[in-house]
Amino acid sequence: MVKEMKTIFVTSNLRFPPSSGPFLRTESVIKALSKYSEVIIYSLNNRDSIGGNPAIEFYKKYTGKIFFAPSAGKSFSVLLKRIINKISRIIFNKRIYNIGGRENDIRFLIKTARKSKANAIWLGHGGTLYDYLKMIKEKSGFVVVVDTDSVWSRFILRGLPYARDEKMKNEMGVAGKLKEEEERWGTEIADMTTAVSGFDAEYFKKFVENKEKIKILSNVLDLKNYEVDIAKPLGFKNPSIFFAGSFGLDSPMNDAVKWFVEHIFPVVKDSVPDVHFYILGSNSDTTLEYKNEPNISILGRVESVLPYLCNADAVIVPLRFESGTRFKILEAGACRRPVVSTTLGAEGIPVTNNHDIIIADDEKNFAKGIIKVIKDKHYAEMIGNNLYKLIEENFTIKNLENEISMIVKELNKENNKNKEYNL
């Protein structure tokens, strides 16, 4: 296939093997995009943090070259310079260092795009890169795609009811409104914005007259990665409950664990005394309590969640605030595991309660759903198999390739209208 496009793919979420949803999305999008466009990766992280030589070798299959931003891997140096600047401002009322890390990274990106004769710049997880978008548009004529993984303002504002105090609530309210404004002007000036679901797409469409500028680019999985029998980890206990994510103080994940452990898990243990709860993911081991609970294991970041996920009796998504679609549910479906989730936890995925998932928004019914899939193996198998079918039909690399095919056609039209993209 002749590839008319050459795309610079910018990402701060490159890692092999992928350890969580953001990295899974990056891998999937690069795989699918490479079918229709030459891809050049521009990583905002250094070689070691993306997985070293194995990561480089893996991505060579899909990309012509990998560039690293000038500031990649210099976070300690930048932090040290900021501390020195702060002290210098107090003593001498002036800065010692001109840091300008992101501005330098953006300038180098534009230079790289011009030298590579790229047609477009693709901002992976673009909801965090609106400053890149603005400067690229100010300094060049490149077509820019803002590839979002969620609606960040919604992510922030949904957390207001769960803020730990009034001060935090006020700060979150201000941050959420500022993010809404950033999303507004960012969607206006981007040549295209992608959303992970129709629900998110409707949000971005309200900012533009031309609704064709908003495209759906789903979160998907490469099911081949889940078609092997995966042994249980040493000492793994059944019956078991599984939950994974990226944790942090006041994060949706930490709130979900607190709600589950304090209000739902005791009810489950009353009915299933030997049940064990596994919590996996970055910072779970440093930001969560409950480490001394005999029925709970908090494992932190592991090389792969699959040995735990694929052997769990129940997968839970007890989220009360967040945005986007959940790789947790997609991966559970790929492993044919039954899922119990809140309505918000399953947002953006066309699931049906008691057919391919169990939806529960209160403690009593959430506990009831877990107990049922643990005790009723036939019911659990039915839920897991139906969820697998849903994923197979709607959330695979093939589905993503079809979506990207349409996007690339639109980008080619945009480039034909704007022959001066490489100013």
Image (cartoon, grey):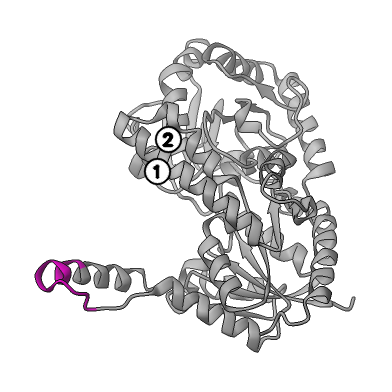
Q: Residues within 10 Å of mark 2 (few under 14, many from 20)?
A: many
Q: Position of residue 129 (x, y in %)?
A: 54, 61
For image coordinates 65% across by 46% down, the residue present is 230
Q: Position of residue 194 (x, y in %)?
A: 70, 54
Q: Decide if residue 288 is in sight here.
A: no
Nearer to us in this view, 67 or 190: 190
Q: Which is nearer the N-term, disc 2 or disc 1?
A: 1
Q: Residue furthest right?
A: 1
On-image quarter of the C terminus: bottom right
Q: Decide if residue 354 is in sight here.
A: yes
Nearer to us in this view, 250 or 393: 250
State the predominant SS element of the stretch in magenta: helix
Q: Which mark is residue 5?
A: none
Q: Residues within 10 Å of mark 1 (few under 14, many from 20)?
A: some
In this figure, which residue is indicated by the disc labeled 1?
A: 248
Q: Residue furthest front?
A: 209
Q: Position of residue 257 (x, y in %)?
A: 45, 30
Q: Is the residue 397 above or below the residue 413 in the image?
A: above
Q: Amino acid at mark 2?
A: Asn
Q: Kindly report the distance in space between the C-alpha atoms of the residues bearing marks 2 and 1.
A: 7 Å
Q: Which mark is residue 254?
A: 2
For image coordinates 29% across by 67% down, the residue present is 79
Q: Position of residue 29 (x, y in %)?
A: 70, 60
Q: Which residues lie in the magenta part?
A: 86-96
Q: Are marks 2 and 1 in contact (CB under 8 Å)?
A: yes
Q: How many marks?
A: 2
For image coordinates 48% across by 10% down, the residue present is 270
For image coordinates 48% across by 15% down, the residue present is 269
